[in-house]
Image (tube, rainbow, N blue to C red):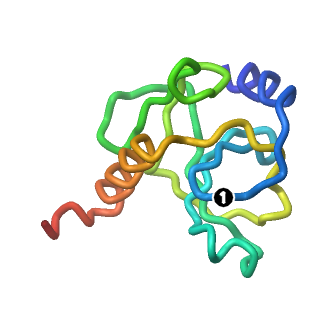
Amino acid sequence: MRGNLKQQAKSQNGNRSNIGGVREARGNLLVCLSRNSAIPLLTGITIAPLTTRIRDIPSEVVLTPEEDGVPETCVVNTDNIQTIQKENLRGLITELSPVRMKEVMEAVRFSLGFDDFE
């Protein structure tokens, strides 16, 4: 299915890097997590990969074509947050809503163990 996501994403474009932007990098879809004000100053961007392998765990946020504009149902996998070179980012696929980004924030907090401090 990953190849299917990649193929569908290639037909869409965009040139902005921004928090909550779903983009392609090296054949994989991802969501940008770096804050907008830092992006022009950075060479690396913090991202969370998207995958169609849905495990229904608190570190994942489900995205759908109807609600989120992704090519097919998938999840943001916050257990695998990475920093990649900004130059590897490709076209903007969609932008996640503020509500969905709050869900991503909660998943990141869970993945990093920050929810233990509440």
Vertical relation: 50 (above or below) 42: above
Horizontal and vertical percent for residue 22? 65, 43
Give the class, few, some or many, for how many residues have Cα within 10 Å of label 1's Cα (few <14, many ≥20).
many
Vertical relation: 39 (above or below) 76: below
User: Which residue lies at the image location 38% right of the left edge and 55% below the top edge?
Assistant: 105
Closer-to-camera residue (13/28): 13
Horizontal and vertical percent for residue 7? 82, 23
Closer-to-camera residue (93/82): 93
* Three-letter residue code for mark 1: Asn
Horizontal and vertical percent for residue 58? 30, 41
User: Which residue lies at the image location 50% right of the left edge and 41% below the top edge?
Assistant: 97
Q: Quadrant of residue 66?
A: top right
User: Which residue lies at the image location 36% right of the left edge and 45% below the top edge?
Assistant: 103
In the image, taking residue 62 as reference, residue 47 lies left or right, namely right
Vertical relation: 105 (above or below) 59: below
Q: Tell me the quarter of the image containing the C terminus.
A: bottom left
In the image, taking residue 52 as reference, residue 113 lies left or right, namely left
User: Which residue lies at the image location 45% right of the left edge and 47% below the top edge?
Assistant: 98
Q: Tell me the quarter of the image containing the N terminus.
A: top right
Q: Residue furthest bottom?
A: 41
Q: Residue furthest front?
A: 98
Q: Quadrant of residue 17?
A: bottom right
The residue that disc 1 covers is 18
